[in-house]
Image (cartoon, helix red, strand yellow):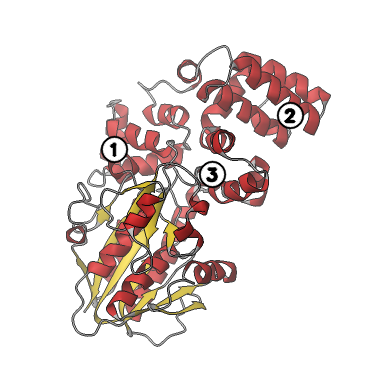
Amino acid sequence: MLRAVEEQGAYTNLVLPSVLRGRGLGGRDAAFVTELVSGTVRGRGSYDAVLAAVLDRPPDRLDPAVLDALRMGAHQLLAMRVPAHAAVATTVDLVRAEVGHGPAGLVNAVLRKVAAHDLPGWVRRVAPDPATDPVGFAAVAYSHPRWVVELLSAALHPGSSALELGRAADRSQPDPDLDRLLEADNAPPKVTLVARPGLASVAELVSAGGTPTRWSSYGVQLTAGDPGHVPAVVEGRAGVQDEGSQLVALALARASVPGADTRWLDLCAGPGGKAALLAALAGERGARLLAAERAPHRSRLVASATAAVREGLLGVVTADGTKPAWASSRFDRVLLDAPCTGLGALRRRPEARWRRRPDDVEDLARLQRRLLDAAADSARPGGAVAYVTCSPVLAETSGVVAAALAERSDVRLEDATALLPGVPDTAGPLPGTVQLWPHVHGTDAMFLALLRKV
């Protein structure tokens, strides 16, 4: 699985279920494999720093399979309750069987050195001094690329200028919010289900082994078991969906819309979770949702996710959201869940922190601005547009919205926080916008801005 993540661009959370089922693993074995794979991907930055301290060459000069095995061994030694002798022996056996006898000897020697200290002890030895380089220390201690730590710190303090943030770092002032966020990024998320209105109930999902979520009236946190074994999920009447994703969809559905309210649009619908929830909500009101997705394989995922939602679905189309194939100004509600860096969902997709590059931020921001223009063009006068990202990075959130407000006279920003009553501490970087956080809300770091077409 680690090779698939690295070489094929696979996502850990998508690969794991099929592999576990294919190998017939369940219970404790499935939990062990899940933590071994996901934890190794999450902790890669910390483990590579440790390995660099005990190797006679940079880690990236090793055979990729050997490096993956060393990272797995390091994760067992430093972050799991695996006896040291077992972690070393099984890793050596794996390398001997899959790579060869020579590398097995190297792995044995390296992991014995790694076992000499626990993870906090290694961090003290290999991370930069927090008194002079707090960002560098956090990057190693919490296994995030340095540039990601800097962007997340800026997102947590949107009112501070870059100069003020730099001065705070120079003074080595502790940032407990940043520590809590980075720590939350490394905590495996619990499985959350959504009961699609009119198709399933929260009570049904609770009876399958869950507890109601705190803020979404349709959410259930699965306390044990495989969601693939829950009948409502198998039948498409419910789905796996983070509570934050549920909340931003519910906020759009709650927004007031004057006049007719019968045509809804999801502009970038893949893989289909929000589209299925919105279509179910639309169906209860006599409205219908059009779900659009550019990539054909993701369009097929949307069709699968919405297959059980018949009343509220107008259709699923494969279309480029920047070049809408429908007449403009026709929709009463528009969701733009824009393609983004995904740096707000690192709990769920830990490999994103290593896969993304700093240049991606500006490239994506340009695409997001084009898509937001198309979303606004697709809304009728009086219609509501929800701009959503699963990234808290300011260039992808307030930067995109501020640019739209500056360039267009036909949209205005409305208060989205009022649409999430009872959810605390949701204030985003612009007044009225919403920013959810893993360390505050236990959700992905979803951003929401509600625009009104005028």
Image coordinates of residue 374 in percent, x first then y, are 39, 76
Q: How crowded is mark 1: few (under 14 residues within 10 Å), some or many (20 or more)?
A: some
Using the rendered image of the protein, determine whether residue 446 is visible from the camera's viewpoint.
no
Lower sequence index among marks 2 and 1: 2
- The residue that appears at 75% across and 25% down in the rendered structure is 93
Q: Amino acid under label 1? A: Leu
337 with respect to 35 (left or right): left
Lower sequence index among marks 1 and 3: 1
Q: How far apart are marks 1 and 3 (CA)?
A: 27 Å
Image coordinates of residue 42 in percent, x first then y, are 51, 36
Q: Name the residue under label 2.
A: 94
What secondary structure is found at the residue carrying circle 1? helix
Image coordinates of residue 34 in percent, x first then y, are 55, 38
Picture quarter with the C terminus: bottom left
Name which quarter of the figure residue 382 lies in.
bottom left
Label placed on residue 351:
3
Q: Judge whether 227 appears above or below 363 on screen.
A: above
Q: Amino acid under label 2? A: Leu
Relative depth, front residue between 49 and 128: 49
What secondary structure is found at the residue carrying circle 3? loop
Viewer-side label of 3, 2: 2
